[in-house]
Amino acid sequence: MVMFVIFTAVLVLMMIGVTTAVTMGGVSIATYLWAGGDPARLFLVAQRMYAQVSGITLMSIPFFLLMGNLMTVGGVSKSLFGFGRVCIGHRSGGLSNAAIVACIVMAAMSGSAAACAAGIGMIAIAEMTKSGYERSFSCATIAAGGALGPIIPPSITLILYAGLTQTSVNALFAAGAVPGVLLGILFMFWSSYVSHRRGYAVTPRAGWRERWAAFREAFFSLLTPVIVIGGMFAGLFTATEAAAVASLYVAILGFFVFKTLSVKDLPKILWDTVEQTAKVMFIIATAGFFQYVLLYTRIPQQTIAFMTTTFSSALPVLMLIIAILVIMGCFLEGTAILLITVPIFVPLMKSFGFDIVQLGIVMCIALAVGVLTPPVGLNLYVMSSITGEKVMNIAKDALGYVAIMILMAVAVALIPDLSLAFSRLVS
């Protein structure tokens, strides 16, 4: 009963426009007092909020946000799409595939769905439209490519999950690599199929000289994920150090290689980063007391007792978790869902003996679906704001990508080696 009241209150408040942090903080305090908590112990609110954001793992978030903002104006996305275009643009669905490949590489830099979609969208949409692609399909393809940002390392979502569950960031990053790349490949097959069926034009085949010129232009951009991911897996950097080094590297590219960044751009970039970091950290902070209230009201323990007596294996529970996350993603932002559900789902799946690294990838993919589903789908609105295309038109053309992502979440849940094999290899 208490759990139903809590989640109903959270859903209603957020749907009427109350911010995530205020919703979680307010509901947590109200629930604590309603459950008989001592008002004199409300100092725990500040204590739990501070403890939640003081972990070293979360320090990487502002650097990854800074890197995403630098890439948006630093010329990185343009060089990546240009290289993909000259390599595969002559094939059926070539431009859409080039956009997805660019999104995969961007995802391996920024860890953010919106930054990935915005960075590639501002470059690719015009060229795809000029080649005869329907604008709604172009937007849907890049929105789906952007959804790879929270899955392919370095992922901000996985960093949050690591902080909440005290799991190794490197293990989660390694586990997300293979499913993320496989999703990108499946997206390319789907976009090629749709492009062929709709008769979209292809670009002329580029000569080797043009390809070499595009590769040289994109070379330093392609090194960014090597620095970030390779440095972490090789043990040279922690996630925070890798994010800081990569931010500096992307800034150097923007100033001295592509020469698209100037000193006058820095105040806005830095302010946007501060604003984004403050929003994310405030939500995470209020989630600290929210988790305490859940434990105080014994909701996780009651949920585990009910599920373990109702189901004899983890499989039906996993399918239920995927369904819950996809449905919640239609109405709530992914970070809020993660912070609300992790304190319940992780102990529940632990009771079934399920690997929490594998669970993190399943949850991450299921949550990423939410950026493509209205009414809250973040990437739909990002692409709509860039192009002026109606959100529902983009959402309609994104249905194929949504189905692929749900099937991938199920596949990762059913096949442990799909996520854990590479993680074990790296470790």
Image: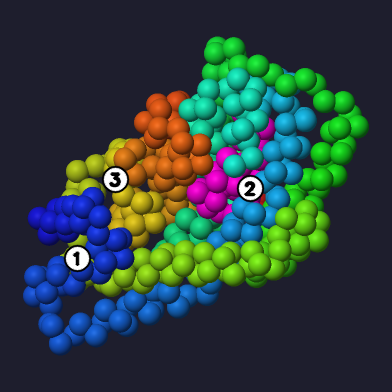
> Which residue is found at the position 32% from the left and 78% from the top?
48
| First in sequence: mark 3 vs mark 2 | 2
Cα distance in 3D space between marks 3 and 1: 18 Å
Amino acid type shown at disc 3: Phe
Q: Position of residue 253 (x, y in %)?
A: 76, 58
Q: Which residue is mark 2?
A: 106
| First in sequence: mark 1 vs mark 2 | 1
Q: Position of residue 19 (x, y in %)?
A: 29, 61
Q: Secondary structure at mark 2?
A: helix
Q: Position of residue 363 (x, y in %)?
A: 41, 48
> Which residue is found at the position 77% from the left and 30% from the top?
87
Observer able to see residue 416: no
Q: Quadrant of residue 257?
A: bottom right
Q: Quadrant of residue 173?
A: bottom right
Specify whether 31 is left or right of 375: left
Q: Secondary structure at mark 3?
A: loop
- Closest to the observer, 300 or 382: 382
Assign the magenta stretch its main secondary structure: helix
Label 3 packing within 10 angstroms: few (<14), some (14-19), many (20+): some
Q: Which residue is mark 1?
A: 27
Q: Which residues are magenta?
A: 96-121
Q: Secondary structure at mark 1?
A: helix
Amino acid type shown at disc 1: Val
Amino acid type shown at disc 2: Met
Q: Quadrant of the N terminus?
A: bottom left
Relative vertical location of residue 344 with respect to residue 144 in this rendering, above or below: below
| First in sequence: mark 3 vs mark 1 | 1
> Which residue is found at the position 39% from the left and 74% from the top?
52
Q: Which residue is mark 3?
A: 331
* Identity of the residue furthest to the right in this view: 209
Relative vertical location of residue 104 with respect to residue 97 in this rendering, above or below: below
